[in-house]
Amino acid sequence: MDYQAVLEEVAAFARPYVGHGQVADYIPALEKVPMDRFGIALADINGEVYGVGDWEVPFSVQSISKTFSLALVMANDNDDIWKRVGREPSGTPFNSLVQLEWENGVPRNPFINAGALVVTDRLQTLTGDASTTMLHFLREESGNPDLAFDQAVADSEADHGDRNAALAHFMASFGNLENPVPSVIEHYFWQCSIEMSCRDLAAAGGFLARHGLRADGSRLLEAREAKRINAVMLTCGTYDAAGEFAYRVGLPAKSGVGGGIVAVVPGRCTLCVWSPGLDSRGNSVAGAAALDHFTTLTGWSVF
């Protein structure tokens, strides 16, 4: 398949959707990102990367980081994390406090904010430095040694992170955090602040398409573990729009309010698309349209 030609056709299809929606203005540092940006990249299982548009422009990964923290925890801790976080779609916004009250401080899944805080907490226990561990992993898998945290984004999130702090304190009251709340929150914000391009993210997510094999051929996850992460991405990775996204696109995916979406075609490739305009659920409008057209054009989906 001519990947470059496919991506160019997908980009042309998605172009009318660029600029629709709104940026994540509740994080002031993200409010300044131009709405006319659009990029898409595809990394095949051999590590070759193709791209169109703004595919090499770095942006804030935000919640896409949750996929990588979960993978690192599972690589070091097997399935133990599932004793502290569920695997079901939330049906409520990603920063909701409501379900935690009903479910005794156990988050519904690892991709809502509460669940990601639990995963970050566990990664902090396992490594002693959750955010730096993730950054080093992403540098290695993407092949980009210059990846870095964005201080302005991290500070912006910390200055407006009261709800995340509330989630963490609430779970701590149920005994579902191992580390002090300020430490967990700090590492969570640093992880979300990492800047990567579509090229970087498509390459870094390749282990999910390779059934757990890293870029150097070593094994990060067992095949069944990679399958399970992909499954949770499909059912929970696009907030409370996961059902609609599965219906339209048919791929495991994780979105972030920075406008990025990473999607996996197991055994074939990993994609990343970026456009900052978000719908009401926090997913990129043009990004979702692009991935919808990609699976329609190629016939590649998990269904």
Image: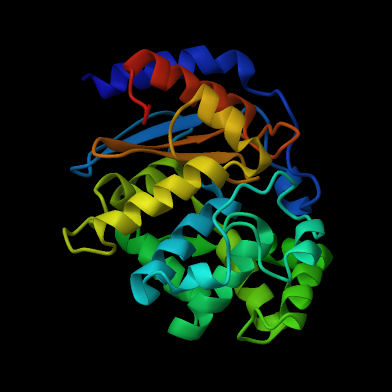
Answer left or right for 176 relative to 4: right
For the point 31% across and 62% down, the residue is 140
Residue 258, position in %: x, y? Answer: 63, 45
For the point 30% across and 16% down, the residue is 5
Kindly tell me whether residue 38 is visible in this rendering. Answer: no
Residue 263, position in %: x, y? Answer: 43, 38
Residue 118, position in %: x, y? Answer: 60, 71
For the point 59% across and 57% down, the residue is 109
For the point 48% across and 49% down, the residue is 232
Residue 19 in which image quadrant: top right
Tell me the quarter of the image containing the C terminus: top left
The correct choice, above or below, for 270 with respect to 116 in the image is above
Answer left or right for 201 relative to 167: left
Answer left or right for 217 relative to 236: left
Q: Front-most of 265 and 157?
A: 265
Residue 151 in which image quadrant: bottom right
The correct choice, above or below, for 132 with respect to 300 in the image is below
The correct choice, above or below, for 54 with respect to 103 in the image is above
Residue 74, position in %: x, y? Answer: 39, 68
